[in-house]
Amino acid sequence: MYYVGIDIGSTASKVSVFDDQELIFNIVMPTGWNSVDTSNKIKEELDKNKIDLENAKVVATGYGRISVPYADKTITEITCHGKGAYYLAGKDMMTVVDIGGQDTKIINIENGRVTNFLMNDKCAAGTGRFLELMANTLGVTLEEMSYMALKGEDLNITSMCTVFAESEVISLIGSGAKREDIARGVINSIIGRITTLLNKQGIRGDVYLTGGLCELASFIQLLSEKIDRKVNTSSLARYAGSIGGALLAKNI
Amino acid sequence: MIELPKRFDEYEESRREGFIKIKELKDKGVNIVGTFCTYAPTELIYAAGAVPVSLCSGNQDIIAQAEVDLPENLCPLIKSSYGNAVTERCPFFYFSDLVVGETTCDGKKKMYELLKNIKDVHVMNLPQSQLNEHDFEYWKAELIKLRRVLEEKFNVEITDEKLRESIKTRNRERKILLEFYELGKLNPAPISGFDLNSAAEAVAFRFDREKAYEEIAMRTLELKEKYERELKGKKTNRPRILITGCPTVGVRKKVIDQIEELGADVVGFESCSGPKEMMELVDETMEPIDAIAKKYLNIHCSVMTPNPNRFKVLDEMIDDYQVDGVVEVILQACHTFNIESYNVKNYVANVKNKPYISIETDYSEFDLGQLKTRLNAFIEIL
C-alpha cells in the first residue's frame, strides 16, 4: 500500500509518497493557473513512478485541495503541516512557522498534534509572494535577493501592502539606494511581520520553519537573529504539508 | 397620505412585500419605532402604543453606497444599516416615525448624526460602565427622557400601569425565546445552529407578535419531543461550538452555516443575537423605570468597561451547553469586541481549557476561502 500526500499551494504543488515502511520520494512543481490541471499532472507523475492509485490512499491539502478528484480525503494545510513538521523534527513541543505563497501560519504543536494556530491577514503582506514580487522588482531571484540582504544595511520599507511596497521599492531604486540595502529592507519587513505573528501566538518549544523558504540560509539567519532563537529547518521542510498529508492517509 | 419609496417598482419581490406589509400597518395608524440594538428598551415603546422593529442590516450589496458618505474602515453593520436607510431599501426605517439609537460605539453615535438629516432620531446616552451607582442613575435619567420623548411624539401618556403590562408581555416573550435557544443544551442538538439563530432573529421583524412567539413556543415543544423520541442517548462525533462576539446578522451563512457544513454543531450563542438579552428578565416587583434601567444596564456588551458579566456568562454557557470549542466572530473595525477578544481568548483557553479561535470578517464574500481553511483547521483540532 502507498500513502500519498498532495499539497496544492498557491505557488507550488508538492507530492510525498510513503510505502508501508518509509518516505520513498517527493515531487515539487509550479501550481500554474489551474489546480485541476495540476492535479492531473500529479497523477501522470505518480503513474510514471509506478504508484497505482488503486493501491494507494491519497490525502489532498493546501488551497487547491478540493481540486484533486482522486483524493480519498481532504485535510487542511494546518493539520498537515503540523503532522509533517513533527515527522521531520520529532520534537514534542514545537512552534512551526510556515511561509507559504499566499499565507503565513504559526502552528503550535504538542506531541505531534496541533494545539493552536494563527494565520496572517487576508493579503500578501508577510508571505512568500511578497518576497517574490520584490525580488522581481529588484531584477534578481529570490535566492540572490536573500544573499544580497546579508551584505546590506537595513533600510526601512514602510508599507506592508505588497502593491504599495512595490512602488516604494521602485522609488528607492530611483533615488539611488543600494540594491543590497533595499534587499535587506525587504527581508526585514517580512521578518518583522512574522515576528509579530510569532509573539502574538507565543513561541513554545523549538521554532521550525516550513514552506518554500526553508533553503534560504540568509533568510533563516536573519530571522533567527531577529527572534533571538535558533530557527530549525531541513531541505525537506518545503514538503511538510504533503508529508503530513501522506502520514494522515495512513489513518484512512 | 403614506407614500411608497420613489424607486419601489425596481425592488425585488421580497423587499416589495416587506414594504407593503408595513404600509398596511401605517395605513391603520400604527406608530412604528425603529431600533438598532438590544439596548433599546422595547417596554417603553410598547407602552407608548407604538411598535418597535429592528432595522435592516447585514447585507453587503448596500455597503458601496454607504461608503459614499461613511469611511470604508468602519464596521460593516453600521455601514449596512446606514446604506439601507438612506437608499430607502429598509421598509422598517422608511416607515419609522421615530428611530431610537444608543451610543454603544463611536461609529454608531456619529452615524446617527447623519441619519438625523433624514429621520427623527432619538439617541440614548449609554454609560460606559455598569458597575457604579451613578451609571444606573445616568441610564435611568435617559429612560425618563425617552419616556417623555415618546409621550410627546405620539401624544400619549405612558402610565406605570401600561409599563407594568408591557414588562410582563416582554418577559413572557423573552422566556419563550430563551427556551428555544436552550434547545442547544440538548446533546445531540435537535436543530442546527443556523436554523436556530435564523428563526429566533426573524421574530424581531414580525408584527403579529403573539402568533410569532406562539410559533416559536410550538417549535420548541416539537423539537423537544423529537429529541426524546429520536436523539436522546445517541452519540455523535460532531464537536459542539459556542459562538461569541459581534452580532451574527450578515455572517450567519459564512460562519455558522460553514462551521456546520464542515462537521461541527453550533449549539450556543453568546452574542447580541443570542440569548444574551433574554437571560435577565425585567424585575416585575420593582418600580417600572428602575426595573427596566437595571435590566438593560446589565447587558454584557463589550462597549461596557470593564465587562465582567460576559466572562460569567461564558463560564456558564461553556458548561451548560457542553461546548468543545469557542469561535469568536469579530466584525471588521469593531474595536471593543476586537480588543476584548484578548481577555476572552485567555479566559476560554486558560481558565476553561477549551480551544478558541477568533475570526475577523465583514459581509463580503472575498474571504470565504481563507475563512473556510481557518474554521476547518479549528474543527480538525477539536
Image (cartoon, grey):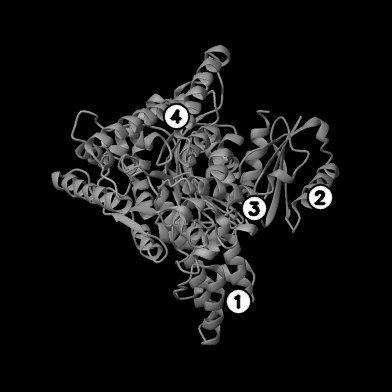
Report the residue marked by disc 3.
B12
Chain at numbered mark 3: B
Tag 4 and tag 2 share a subunit? no
Closer mark to the observer between disc 4 and disc 2: 4
| In this rendering, position of residue A43 left or right of residue B226 | right
| In this rendering, position of residue A35 left or right of residue B25 | right
In three-dimensional space, the C-alpha distance between marks 4 and 2, rounded to whole angstroms, equals 50 Å
Tag 3 and tag 2 share a subunit? no
x and y percent of residue B239 in the render?
A: 52, 29
Q: In this view of the protein, which residue sits in the foreground, B314 or A43?
A: B314
In three-dimensional space, the C-alpha distance between marks 3 and 4, rounded to whole angstroms, equals 32 Å
Closer mark to the observer between disc 3 and disc 2: 3
Asked if marks 3 and 2 touch (Cβ < 8 Å), the reply is: no
**Which structural element holds mark 1?**
helix
Please tell me how crowded label 2 is: few (under 14), some (14-19), or many (20+) other residues with Cα within 10 Å.
some
Please tell me how crowded label 1 is: few (under 14), some (14-19), or many (20+) other residues with Cα within 10 Å.
many
> Image quadrant for the N terminus of chain A?
top right
Q: In this view of the protein, which residue sits in the foreground, B277 or B331?
A: B277
In three-dimensional space, the C-alpha distance between marks 3 and 2, rounded to whole angstroms, equals 46 Å
**Which structural element holds mark 4?**
helix
Report the residue marked by disc 1.
A138
Tag 3 and tag 4 share a subunit? yes
Question: Is residue A132 shown above or below A199?
Answer: below
Closer mark to the observer between disc 4 and disc 1: 4
Chain at numbered mark 1: A
x and y percent of residue B309 in the render?
A: 28, 37
**Which structural element holds mark 2?**
helix
Report the residue marked by disc 4.
B181
Chain at numbered mark 4: B
| Mark 1 residue type | Leu
